[in-house]
Amino acid sequence: MADKRATVIRGGRLVGTGGRRAELADILIVGDSVAEVGPAGLAAPADAIVIDARDRLMHPGLINAHTHGHGNLAKGMGDRWTLELLLAAGPWITGSRTLEDKYLSTYVGAIEMLLKGCTACYDLTVEFPLPSVDGLDACGRAYADAGMRAVLAPMVAEFSFFESIPGLIDALPPAMQKEVERLRLAPSDATLNAMRQSMQSWAFDREYIRPAVAPTIPHHCSDDFMRKCATLAREFAVGLHSHVQESKAQVMVGLKRYGKTQTAHLQDLGLLGPDFTVGHGVWLDHDDMSRLGDHGASVAHNPGSNMRLGNGLADIRAMLERKVNVGIGTDGANCSDNLNMYESMRLASMVSKTQGPDTDRWLTTGEVFAAATEGSARALGFGDRLGRIAPGYKADIVLLDLHNVNWMPFNDAVNQLVHTEDGSAVRSVMIGGRLVVEDSRMVGVNMAALARRVEEARARLEGATLPNRQLFERVEQVVNSFCPGLAKMPYHIDRFGGGHHGHEHADWARRR
């Protein structure tokens, strides 16, 4: 039977009430959900656990709409990498993983997110050459042990990076062509069967950890494989997530392969729907955005990695105008170098303000905060119970210390959450009514022991992946010549979008 004990959080300031400064409020929690929100002195059962929130700002847990748990052991391993160089480096920076490595990489990411006020994430994790029941179970256990919610989606494909880019293998010297053959993925039927087996044997409470399906990038998959991924996801009523139009090179490959944008092609394949999330969408045109909005789909906006990998600046205002649900993500630590959702909010705000002088088109801090909570919750499939502090919603709550320098002075709750907070004021984090962070520390986690385990894994992987590193160093120059060449090809924008704001052509030029 579920624990129905009551907890009352007293005397904190609640974001979303009272405008700029947030009003004092009490929150009554019964079991894992918010039962009532009211003014100070709210009635509570006599035996309720009392949490003193004086000098605290309370906000719903931030929700990471797009990350990669396998990337956490690859933190900081590259600098001037495009998306295509990152993909080419994948066998090096995320290869040779044991089950313990898969668990540890995911667990470290969960700890980082929790300590920085994030209570749920959409994790697109990868295993080579195909997902496994044991591997996905290890990743799920990592989130369960951390006490965090997650949607866990194996990132799958049929074609390796080198096979997916037309002409790239031919651009490699013959000896390198032979070497990259060993990077081929498992046959599609084996991959689909592995995902099916994992969903059939799913051992985790789906209110906390649920599966999903993530065909990695459309042109890394055949049309038949994409359709079968969608069929599998809908058979088990789980989400679909794919990297779509993230880089201009991807766009050009899509146009060459499909004769249309990837989004238009996905619509033709029947993948678009309320269960579908686009990762990145930097190069969506207005017609693409309308397609997504018309189908109730989501975009996971990752401003940090979009800039880090040189992919450009997504036009979130245009997406919102076309009724696209927008969430915010960090992307993986192998291409954004941290999992700080406060930083992602700040970057989302700043990116919108660099795209022109019309301030009406800039995102407000309120819109950014809503995207990082309610918008991300909807992308994860939790839109009716995460992302708000309100009766009936899960008690996933973050308490910030208003004595932290970030809040001196305390002028505007939402503005400072988005523009000032960096995670250093996180004092307590509650998930489902249970504190997993207290006094800015993970409950029950020996961080020194964890650091030793991580360092041991890093040292072992450094040796185990040396052949893959050496291969990457041999192909790097070819990839970094061939793929930017695709990105430099003219993009015939007259056949795209249109729009009624008079700034479309300037936006596309800027994104190049």
Image (cartoon, grey):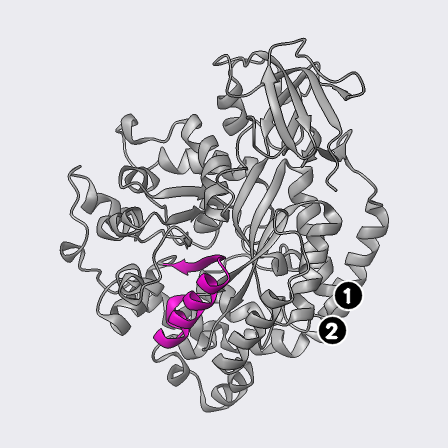
Q: Is residue 40 visible?
A: yes
Q: Residues within 10 Å of mark 2 (few under 14, many from 20)?
A: few
User: Would residue 17 appear left or right of 29 to someone viewing this image?
Assistant: left
> What number is the disc on residue 44?
none
Which residue lies at the image location 21% right of the left edge and 44% below the top edge? 506
Q: Quadrant of residue 315?
A: top left
> x and y percent of residue 139 in the render?
67, 60
Give coordinates of residue 466: x percent, y percent. 67, 75
- Image: magenta residue range: 217-244
Q: Amino acid at mark 1?
A: Ala
Is residue 409 visible in the rendered image? The answer is: no
| CA distance for labels 1 and 2 | 7 Å
Q: Is residue 234 magenta?
A: yes
Decide: marks 1, 2 in contact (CB < 8 A)? Answer: yes
Say if 433 sits above or below 130 in the image. Answer: above
Residue plotted at (72% across, 69% down): 462
Q: Is residue 138 above or below residue 422?
A: below
Residue 203, quarter of picture: bottom right
Q: Is residue 379 magenta?
A: no
**Disc 2 residue type (three-letter):** Gly
Residue behind mark 2: 463
**For the point 71% across and 62% down, which residue is it?**
138
Which residue is denoted by mark 1 in the rendering? 459
Figure check: 378 above or below 199: above
**Residue in front for this viewpoint, 141 or 4:** 4
Left or right of 181 on screen, residue 430: right
* 173 sits to left or right of 8: left
Residue 427 shown left or right of residue 273 in the figure: right
Horizontal and vertical percent for residue 47? 81, 20
